[in-house]
């Protein structure tokens, strides 16, 4: 399944290591593991969805029965890298009941009055759920750094704060999957043009997007530091080549699947005696031997 790619391969190939922490080491158009064409990616989709669905249900069931584990997918990337599209794709593969989705824009006045992790903690997935973050606490070492929103000593200290926070999350049972959606400046230009040219996409455009684009190299350097400093065993970063949407979608779904497989959620054992409950249901059941007479059951043929 998955175009011959095993979970171990997918996790290994795309995982950031000290040698590959610089985005420049990655080609945003590459397909280093898994399907090499849109048709091949489409061919894997239903098998991935089926396996994801089953594991998600087991994780949810664990949570209902007192399990503490959850999974948190963090999506970061430049404008147009496809954070929103990825949320849509992933959400389409999962049961919405077990999802907790949050997006993080410019902090509100209230949020600015708190520590930068305050608003993040409030959106963490409850036990049994899969959380998806469209942007995250990493903005506080990306945009905050590049745009000079806080002094250098403040954002520099945040790398350690983030690592401590994420290792605390791991201890609490939150498994993190952090995805850097890696898009090229050429592809971004095409996507920004599409946002300007298509009336139904204009709402996604903001004139400030061009100022951010103009600082492309500064942002890539900031990402390089994030990937280098904050890809830890407890909370690894993965690079998702994102110039091709079908590949980006396949990778994120496959990383999610591989991570869930590692977590190996198990449907909980019942805390009651199944045989006894079965016998109780059958013996005390007024409908035993068929439906009761229709007189007791509303209008004939109704319901
Ligand atoms: P979008 O994802 O296009 O809706 O844009 C959200 C905007 O909010 C982006 O320009 C982000 O850089 C910005 N943003 C998100 N988090 C922060 C933060 N902690 N500080 C400043 N700006 C942020
Ligand atoms: Mg935007």
Image (cartoon, grey):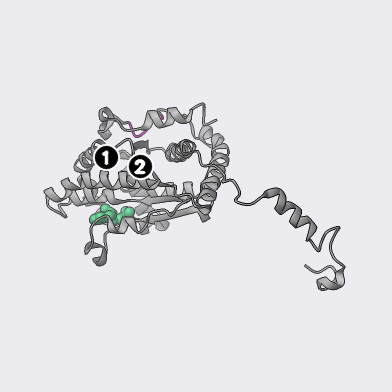
Q: Is residue 28 magenta?
A: yes
Q: CA distance from mark 1 to mark 2?
A: 10 Å
Secondary structure mostly seen in the magenta stretch: loop
Q: Quadrant of ligand 2?
A: bottom left
Name the side, left or right, on which 45 lies relative to 204: right
Q: Tell me what residue is drawn at x 27 percent, y 55 percent.
A: 117
In the image shown, does 166 or 199 lie closer to the viewer?
Answer: 166
Q: Position of residue 102 (x, y in %)?
A: 38, 56
**Is residue 252 highlighted in magenta?**
no
Q: Say whether mark 1 is within 8 Å of ligand 1.
A: no
Asked which secondary structure carries label 2, the reply is strand
Circle 1 sits in a helix, a strand or a loop, which is it? Answer: helix
Number of numbered discs present? 2
Q: Could you tell me if residue 30 is visible in this image?
A: no
Q: Which mark is residue 6?
A: none
Residue for badge 2 = 178
Query: Label 1: few (<14), some or many (≥20) within 10 Å?
Result: many
Up-down: is 86 above or below 285?
A: above
């Amino acid at each position: 399944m998955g175009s011959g790619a095993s979970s171990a391969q997918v996790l290994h190939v795309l995982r950031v290591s000290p040698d590959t922490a610089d985005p420049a080491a990655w080609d945003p158009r590459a397909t280093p593991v898994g399907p090499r064409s849109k048709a091949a990616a489409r061919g894997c989709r239903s098998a991935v969805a089926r396996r994801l669905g089953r594991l998600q249900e087991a994780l949810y069931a664990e949570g209902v029965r007192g399990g503490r584990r959850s999974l948190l997918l963090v999506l970061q990337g430049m404008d147009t890298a496809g954070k929103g599209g990825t949320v849509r794709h992933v959400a389409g593969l999962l049961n919405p009941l077990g999802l907790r989705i949050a997006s993080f824009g410019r902090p509100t006045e209230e949020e600015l009055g708190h520590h930068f992790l305050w608003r993040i903690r409030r959106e963490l997935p409850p036990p049994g759920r899969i959380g998806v973050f469209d942007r995250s606490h990493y903005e506080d070492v990306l945009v905050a750094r590049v745009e000079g929103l806080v002094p250098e000593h403040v954002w520099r200290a945040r790398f350690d704060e983030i690592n401590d926070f994420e290792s605390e999350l791991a201890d609490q049972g939150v498994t993190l999957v952090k995805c850097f959606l890696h898009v090229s400046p050429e592809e971004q230009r095409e996507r920004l043009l599409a946002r300007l040219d298509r009336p139904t996409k204009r709402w996604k455009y903001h004139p400030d997007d061009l100022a951010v684009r103009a600082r492309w190299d500064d942002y890539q350097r900031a990402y390089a530091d994030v990937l280098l400093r904050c890809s830890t065993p407890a909370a690894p970063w993965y690079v998702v080549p994102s110039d091709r949407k079908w590949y980006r979608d396949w990778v994120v779904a496959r990383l999610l699947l591989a991570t869930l497989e590692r977590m190996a959620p198990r449907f909980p054992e019942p805390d009651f005696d199944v045989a006894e409950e079965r016998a109780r249901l059958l013996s005390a059941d007024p409908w035993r031997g068929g439906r009761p007479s229709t007189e007791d059951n509303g209008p004939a043929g109704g319901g």
